[in-house]
Image: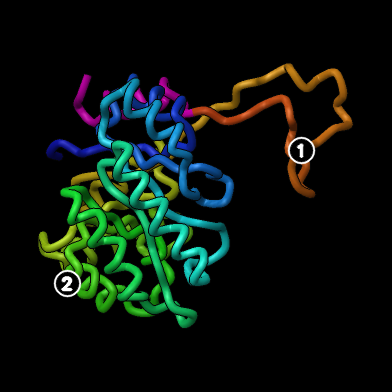
Amino acid sequence: MGRILLEVCCGSADDVIEAHRAGADRVELNSDLFHGGLTPTLGSLIVAKRETGMRIMAMVRPREGGFRYTDAEFAAAVEDAKLLLAHGADGLVFGFLHEDGTLDVQRTGALAELALSAGKECVFHRAIDVVPDWRAALDTLIGLGVTRVLTSGQEPDVSLGTGTVREMIAYAAGRIEILPGAGITARNMDRVIAETGCSQIHLAAHRTRTDASVRNNRAIFYGGCLYPPEDRFQVADGAYIGGLVSRLGRD
């Protein structure tokens, strides 16, 4: 097995700092990982870049729930993309589809052009996993100059989609990078790498950290109807990530 690049999915500047300390090669910076990752704040990007200097791919996703956006949502995504690039993002991560699940070529091309014209990378995210024809989608993305595609092989967990990921890599034939992700853990990482033949992986690894400042009144909640505990939050698990880095043959 050659050198495998490790990208870590992050939801905050602290996540990026932890991933950097653990030896990750690259991060994808988001907000709201509970909903699959939304556009991060500029503050989190600026601090993460300043504190680590590492390669940061910034998510551009204006809301949860699908990838067909209103005109106003897309306009906001364009403005966010411009600001993220201007404040240090090394690339943009995005995905735009039509109502039938096919690729929105015009909107995807617009975001790709923003990144490429700035000399940065552009990544089509796991919206690829719901398109009706991934080969046609890859052909279009290659034509638009997209750098990379993040995919679980059109399965809920990439460990179930390794065959399709391997087919994608073969079909791409070096014309676009294929980045397997979603559900990679210490238990299945080696198998995913072996079965896909990939050269890079994307994973998330978090642990719970507590914040006791709200414990004076445990009846108060600030979220929605799920009522998550208000005295804890998630942060990247540097020790776990570091263990994976060591297994990938790096210090």
> Element under label 2?
helix
Q: How is the image coloured?
A: rainbow
User: Residue 122: which disc?
Assistant: none
| Quadrant containing the C terminus in the rendered view | top left
Q: Quadrant of residue 144?
A: bottom left
Where disc 1 sits, the SS reads loop
- 98 w.r.t. 228: above or below: below
**Residue 76 coordinates in the image, percent (x, y):** 47, 58
**Residue 174 falls left or right of residue 187:** left
Horizontal side, residue 137 vs residue 184: left or right: left
> Residue at (19%, 27%) from the top-left corner?
249
**Dot 2, how many residues are within 10 Å of its Cα: few (below 14), some (14-19), or many (20+)?**
few
Location of mark 2 (residue): 143
Tally of numbered tags: 2
Of callouts 2 and 1, the N-terminal one:
2
Q: Quadrant of residue 113?
A: bottom left
Is 222 on the left or on the right of 167, as rendered?
A: right
The answer to whether mark 2 and mark 1 are in CB contact below 8 A is: no
Amino acid type at image mark 1: Tyr
**Prevalent SS, magenta region:** helix
Residue labelled with disc 1:
222
Q: Residues within 10 Å of mark 1 (few under 14, many from 20)?
A: few
For the record, the magenta segment spans 236-251
Alpha-carbon distance for marks 2 and 1? 45 Å
Q: Is residue 111 magenta?
A: no
Residue at figure coordinates x 45%, y 65% from the top left: 74
Tell me which amino acid carries mark 2.
Gly
Residue 136 location, quadrant: bottom left
Quadrant occupied by the N terminus? top left
Nearer to me, 47 or 25: 47
Q: Position of residue 201 (x, y in %)?
A: 29, 44
Vertical side of 143 occupied by 195: above or below: above
